[in-house]
Amino acid sequence: DGATVWMTGSSSGPRVLDGANADAMRRLYAFNAGADWTTLYASAESVGTASVDGRPPHVIEMRPARGPADTWYLRQADDRLTRIDGSLRTPTTAMRRGTIRFHDWRKVDGVLVAHLRRMEFGPTSWEIRYESIENDVEIASARLGVPDEVEAEMKVARGEESPGGMKVVDRNA
């Protein structure tokens, strides 16, 4: 539908995100697609420098319209983004800090793009390595469909069904 944000995980299963969590996920994927930071955040403020991997990056506090601020670390030599620290609420509603580190920058259609992202979120860490990245590739609409298990969670989130698949007939009964 263009508005619903969802994710699936091996430990959490399908989840429909809302509020600040949905906003954070939209920012992440919009950023990955090359969106300008001014379309993702309400404001940004330089908060100095820090030491990351033995180098002193610029530290920028990025404030979204809703939810906690993210912290960006930019390499001083060329202002290349090396790390983002942010927060997401877990399925149990506890707020957790997470980190995304960007590595292996290569040009794609003349623009530098990180081909390796290492992520840590609470006790879990993983990495995404891109062998190749292409722009303006046509994607079959069938690949963009919502999986059945996510559609079931979306019905729960909309109040059309209760968890476990029971249909909501009358909320006032």
Image (spheres, rainbow, N blue to C red):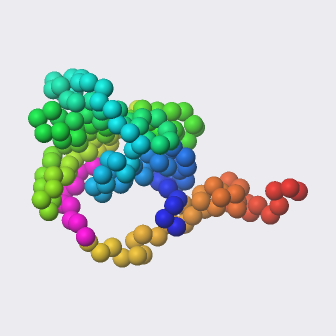
Predominant SS along the magenta part: loop
Residue 170: x and y, percent? Answer: 83, 61
Count of numbered circles on the image? 0
Q: Is residue 120 left or right of residue 81?
A: right
What residue is drawn where x is 22% and y is 36%? Answer: 74
Residue 71, position as x, y percentages in the image:
34, 33
Can you say whether 32 is above or below 50 in the image?
A: below
Magenta residue check for 135: yes
Q: Is residue 166 above or below residue 122?
A: below
- Name the quadrant of the C terminus: bottom right
Give residue 54's position: percent from left, percent from top.
16, 24
Q: Residue at x 50, y 55 (%)?
A: 6
Residue 32 seen in the figure: no
Q: Vertical placement of 138 versus 120: above or below?
A: below
Q: Is residue 111 visible?
A: yes
Q: Quadrant of residue 160?
A: bottom right
30 inside magenta stretch: no
For image coordinates 20% across by 49% down, the residue present is 114
Locate residue 30 relative to residue 52 in the image: left or right: right
Q: Relative to 73, is 120 on the left or the right? A: right
Q: Position of residue 116 (x, y in %)?
A: 22, 47
Most extreme residue toward the right is: 173
State the residue at coordinates (22%, 30%).
58
- Nearest the viewer among 124 and 98 is 98
In this view, 117 is above or below 144: above
Q: Nearer the viewer, residue 140 or 4?
A: 4
User: In the rendered image, which quarter is residue 86 located in?
Assistant: top left
Q: Which residues are magenta?
A: 128-136
